[in-house]
Image (cartoon, rainbow, N blue to C red):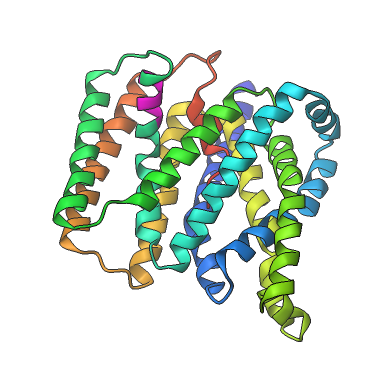
Amino acid sequence: MGSETQQNTQVTGLLSGLLCYTFWGFFPIYFILLRGVAADEVLADRILFAVPFGALIIWGRSQWPEVLAGLRSPRVMLWLLLSATVIALNWLVYISAVQSENTMQASLGYYINPLIYVLVGVVVLGEKLRRAQIAAVVLATIGVLVLTFYGGVFPTIAFTLAITFTIYGYARKKVQIGAMPGLFIETLLLAPFAAGWLWFLIATKDTGMEQGLAGNAGLVGLLALAGPLTVIPLLFFAMAARRLTLATLGFLQFIGPTLQFLVAVVDGEPFTLARQICFGFIWVAVAIFAFDALRHRPHRNEKPIMQVAAAQSSE
């Protein structure tokens, strides 16, 4: 009976992880549909609609005590204020990237994100790189250099996404709060700024929300979807993180940028020779990194930063 229960738990975790990263992988399609709405307005709507939907999920999962405990802790609130600021910037850059047909660069950012975490571990925590990790970082660096000098484009979007998400993951690692309660407080902190900015946009220029109120109800509905589309994948991740090993999550997390890359190709973004070489080096680096993570997976009592980071994709 025990082994059967454990097997069911693992199956549930695997399905949850697949759903989570598949959600995040196809998320660019949503922002492609909203290309007629400015990125800053989409961000404001995403934050505002995430609050009531998040509150509903918190209520359904009986997590209000954890939320209230977080709100009462100055330390938790300071770290969540930092993480909220960084994730808002991350979301804005990601939305802008998709709307400007730079989804391929966005996917590159999430491929190199785990490698950025490794470098942060070296610089901030004084950790030593293993040989495989050094090889992965070197290969990724070569790929980026090829894109920069041969392709003539420094991947600013990719590095901005990777670095902001690394800072976000580090900040979330510093506070003891669940993924969903943490996200709810973050959106709650951002909501007044989002509401103020949305009011300013409506007062000064034509907006998607105004178009919706003028008769385009479908556009309002599409903007409102930002709430559940932000929260639902996180629920699946929370279920997966409790049931799967870090090694399994480490492999699954690359589903997201892979699907984003495919969406970019279908959307018509050019897959130039420079990009082909760059992604070739990145994919080999990712394979080496994932294999090394599998061989050196942490003990059960360790809390890896990758789990915290993967909890909230900037998609």
At horizontal 70% and vertical 35% (from top left) the residue drawn is 182
At horizontal 53% and vertical 40% (from top left) the residue drawn is 14
Q: Is residue 61 above or below residue 208?
A: above
Q: In this view, does 166 lie above or below 314?
A: above
At horizontal 20% and vertical 64% (from top left) the residue drawn is 272
Q: Main secondary structure of the magenta part?
A: helix
Q: Foreground residue, 164 or 257?
A: 164
Q: Foreground residue, 199 or 98?
A: 199
Instruction: Please state the horizontal and vertical placement of residue 279, each as a whole percent of the image.
Output: 24, 50
Q: In this view, does 41 lie above or below 106?
A: below
The residue lying furthest to the bottom in this view is 215
At horizontal 62% and vertical 64% (from top left) the residue drawn is 42
User: Which quadrant: the N terminus?
Assistant: top right
Q: Is residue 49 visible?
A: no
Q: Can residue 260 be seen in this view?
A: yes
Q: Does the magenta stretch include residue 83?
A: no
Instruction: Please state the horizontal and vertical placement of residue 292, each as a whole percent of the image.
Output: 30, 25
Quarter of the image where one finds residue 162: top left
Q: Does the magenta stretch include residue 118?
A: yes
Quarter of the image where one finds residue 218: bottom right
Q: Tell me if 196 is positioned left or right of 88 in this view.
A: right
Instruction: Please state the horizontal and vertical placement of residue 151, each as a whole percent of the image.
Output: 18, 58
Quarter of the image where one finds residue 63: top right
User: What is the count of numbered marks?
Assistant: 0
Instruction: Please state the horizontal and vertical placement of residue 89, each as a whole percent of the image.
Output: 55, 48
Q: Tell me if 78 is positioned left or right of 237 in this view.
A: right
Q: Foreground residue, 35 or 15?
A: 35
Magenta-colored span:
117-122
